[in-house]
Amino acid sequence: MNILLLGSGGREHAFAWKIVQSGDCTQLYVAPGNAGTETIATNVPISITDFEAIRDFITSKNIGLVVVGPEEPLVKGIVDYLQNQPETVAIPVVGPSKLGATLEGSKDFSKRFMQRNNIPTAAYETFTADQLDAALAYLETQNLPIVLKADGLAAGKGVLICLTLEEAKTSLKEMLLDQKFGEASSKVVIEEFLTGIELSVFVATDGKSYKILPEAKDYKRIGEGDTGLNTGGMGAVSPVIFADEAFMARVEEKVVKPTVEGLAKENIPYKGFLFIGLMNKDGEPKVIEYNVRMGDPETEAVLPRIESDFLALLQGIGTGILDSYELKISADYATTVVMVSGGYPGSYDKGKVISLPDTVEGAEIFHAGTGRNAHGELTNQGGRVIAVTGKGKTLQEALSNAFTTVRGIGWDQAYYRKDIGMDILNLM
Ligand code: AMP
Ligand code: GLY
């Protein structure tokens, strides 16, 4: 089968790496891909939001399965588009419908969905600019810290945790009146601050049945000890020690089941991945947010632990036969360390030459923001550039393999967090 994968991050390199290991993969195309996917698949220079070009490519290359990596084309409705075109109506796509993707595209929509389906989450209210007075009055009644969330997609920057009432009021006005996050903050969700330990839970679903993939912990801040600005993610660890069997059973009962059943009951077509960010508060889960895709860099730690055929999982999702898929998960550890361009998440230089080691043991190197210069040399082209996943029987071994590999990769102004996984090691 020929497969088209959309995206260009570390997540997509990890997807591609798994897909080409399957005997059923004839040809894998990645649009637009990166310098890593290029070494194992065929990159095609098509934008992930150019739906017409994607449709034409699917037809011309006899594509049998489309896999959508990032949220943007999903929220813009790529699945509905392809299903409404006579040329592509019969091609299975891994990714939710536009309505399903609204679980990530609108915080207000996802909060209302959780409320209707009795899924535990933080208390909240939603306000628009013409309700500013009511919103300010609501803030007065709430405990601190308080969380403000732009309703729409804001490139991961739309969540503010405010420590004082003054700060909350100022930020709220900036969001609603000054469009701090553009159109995305024309509506704001004001939400209770949750305490506890955060966990990323990944679910594959065809809209009827589901499989729970390995869980992961993400390291979001740029600085060691979880300090400094938020990033797309600086590292990931799987499995996660505080997500024990009892806790994961509660997550399945109270969150995963009612979510998948709620989607079916409300006729929200959903064949894809669901990434549930949640807080473990004294053993009880509370949902922080839904994402309608896999996480990055979590995918780079989750996929190496999947032992069963990954392409068969994708086909099960896309064709609606996930029920018969047998998911096999390795008990081994996978730890991902992300190397970023110095300065990220602020401004940084691009085009620095990167050298990779000739041999790597116990680890995989996934590319994210990489490209090639005119001389064919590997260079950094984005903020998050390389994700190295170490594997091992123990967390120590996996971390050691990851960091040894990272130290063998060189480019000027590279930065990475040296404390990935250390908090979990200290809990063990
Ligand atoms: P998001 O952009 O929705 O992924 O949120 C960014 C981060 O803000 C989350 O990963 C959490 O660490 C934090 N966060 C969001 N909502 C809450 C909340 N209600 N309580 C505590 N932390 C939160
Ligand atoms: N690592 C968090 C995300 O993918 O949104």
Image: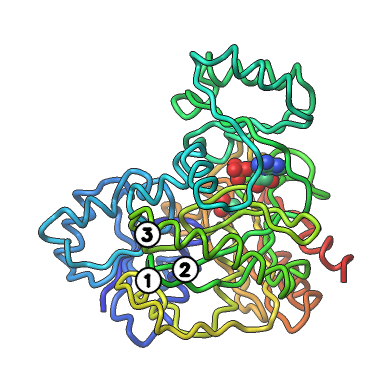
Determine whether, in the image, residue 87 is placed left or right of residue 146. Answer: left
The secondary element bearing badge 2 is classed as strand
The residue indicated by pointer 2 is 204
The secondary element bearing badge 1 is classed as helix
The residue indicated by pointer 1 is 317
Q: How many angstroms separate mark 3 from mark 1 (CA)?
A: 9 Å
At label 3, counting other C-alpha atoms closer than 10 Å, the crowd grade (few under 14, some 14-19, many 20 or more) is many
| Residue drawn at x 31%, y 67% as measured from the top left | 29
| Residue drawn at x 72%, y 81% as measured from the top left | 392
User: Within 8 Å: ligand 2 and the Cβ of disc 1?
Assistant: no
x, y percent for residue 151 = 50, 33
The residue indicated by pointer 3 is 270
At label 1, counting other C-alpha atoms closer than 10 Å, the crowd grade (few under 14, some 14-19, many 20 or more) is many
Q: Is residue 257 visible?
A: yes
Q: Amino acid at mark 1?
A: Ile
x, y percent for residue 87 = 12, 61
Q: Quadrant of the C terminus?
A: bottom right
Q: Amino acid at mark 3?
A: Tyr
Q: Quadrant of residue 254?
A: bottom right
